[in-house]
Amino acid sequence: MQIFREKDPLIQAIQKIKSEGKSVGLVPTMGALHEGHLSLVSNALQDSDQVVVSIFVNPTQFNNQEDLEKYPRNLEKDLELLQSELNDIWVFAPTAQDLYGNKILSENFDFEGLESVMEGKYRNGHFDGVGTVVKRLFEIITPDKAYFGEKDFQQLQIVRKLTEKTGLPVEIVGCPILREESGLARSSRNERLSSQNRQKAAFIYETLQDVKTLFGTKSAEYIHEWVNDRFKDHPTLELEYFEIADSSTLKKIEKKEKGNNYRAFIAVYAEEIRLIDNIALDN
Ligand code: PAF
């Protein structure tokens, strides 16, 4: 494993392997690595000659200063995990200044409406921040493929739109959600949950599984109400939003159309910790 703390030596190393005809796969992360990240890395290792894992807590995608400050950071532990699980990967762990220069600011993107629903609606400017850092990483690392988890399904669609609009020649690979034994989607934020709340948060995926069953026979309107009722009196979990949307446009479902693919999306607070999840409804 090789660790790059600055972009210039990494750019040189990548130029060298690319001149040898080798392919590069990128797994962008904000650290606090878990099994979900490792599964992205193992997908990348299967079809790229050189895998780069970036570890950078990107300030421009946080709309809440406290959330940014409390985001778990432990580079040493992350490196240990990557070292013990998998060999021969390059880690890019830059400073904000190296990545952004003196102005830590987002670009403004038009993702054709993908950015203004769900996460975009509740986290103002979030996807401009994600777009800015992902574009920057793609420019520096020039990966042939980049791997993103489906847990952040809206982010995945936005990154696809980013490559389409910028023309950056990167293939975006979406990887399935990894879950804890209880069903809770793996996330770096789970570390901040008490062990009791971590168990209770399994209710989120249980709800999504029931939604998938109901979607076979009930209208979206009915399901919406059913989910709201389920969370109304929950002692620990507070529902922020629940949506059923078209998987590619992310537009809220009006009426089920044959041939369209739909997903259910949810955001929930367990005390002050925000958890998101989603499920495909058609398979
Ligand atoms: O999904 C994440 O961890 C982040 O949003 C990403 C893609 C690494 C950009 O900072």
Image (cartoon, rainbow, N blue to C red):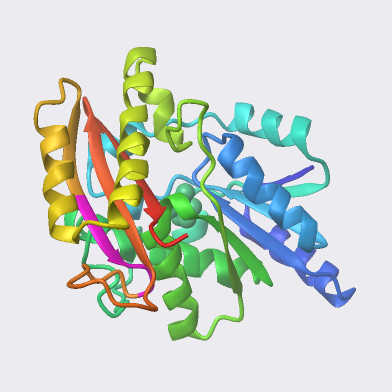
**Residue 60, percent across and down?**
33, 55
- Relative placement, left or right, of 141 versus 217 is right
Of all residues shown, which one is farthest toward the right?
20
Residue 265 location (% of width, % of height): 30, 53
Q: Which residue is drawn at 37% across and 37% down?
A: 205
The N terminus - image quarter: top right
Residue 174 highlighted magenta (yes or no): no
Residue at screen point 39% across, 33% down = 189
Q: Is residue 7 visible in this depiction of the protein?
A: yes
User: Looking at this view, is 261 or 115 the one in front?
Assistant: 261
Magenta: predominant secondary structure element?
strand
Q: Give the range drawn in magenta.
A: 242-248
Q: How many marks?
A: 0
Along the horizontal axis of the image, is 140 left or right of 271? right
**Among the 4 quarters of the image, the one containing residue 269:** top left
From the viewer's side, name the closer residue of 175 and 225.
225
Where does residue 184 sit, x and y in percent of width and height? Answer: 42, 33
Residue 271 to residue 91: above or below: above
What residue do we see at 25% from left, 75% from top? 113
- Nearest the eye: 140 or 209: 209
Q: Which residue lies furthest to the front in this view?
A: 217
What residue do we see at 56% from left, 36% from top? 33
Q: Where is residue 252 in the image (x, y as percent from the top left)?
A: 21, 67
In the picture, measured across the screen, residue 50 lies left or right of residue 183, that is: right
Compared with 202, 13 (above or below) is: below
Among the 4 quarters of the image, the one containing residue 237: top left
- Whether the magenta-drawn stretch holds residue 243 is answered as yes
Tell me if I can see residue 103 in this picture.
no
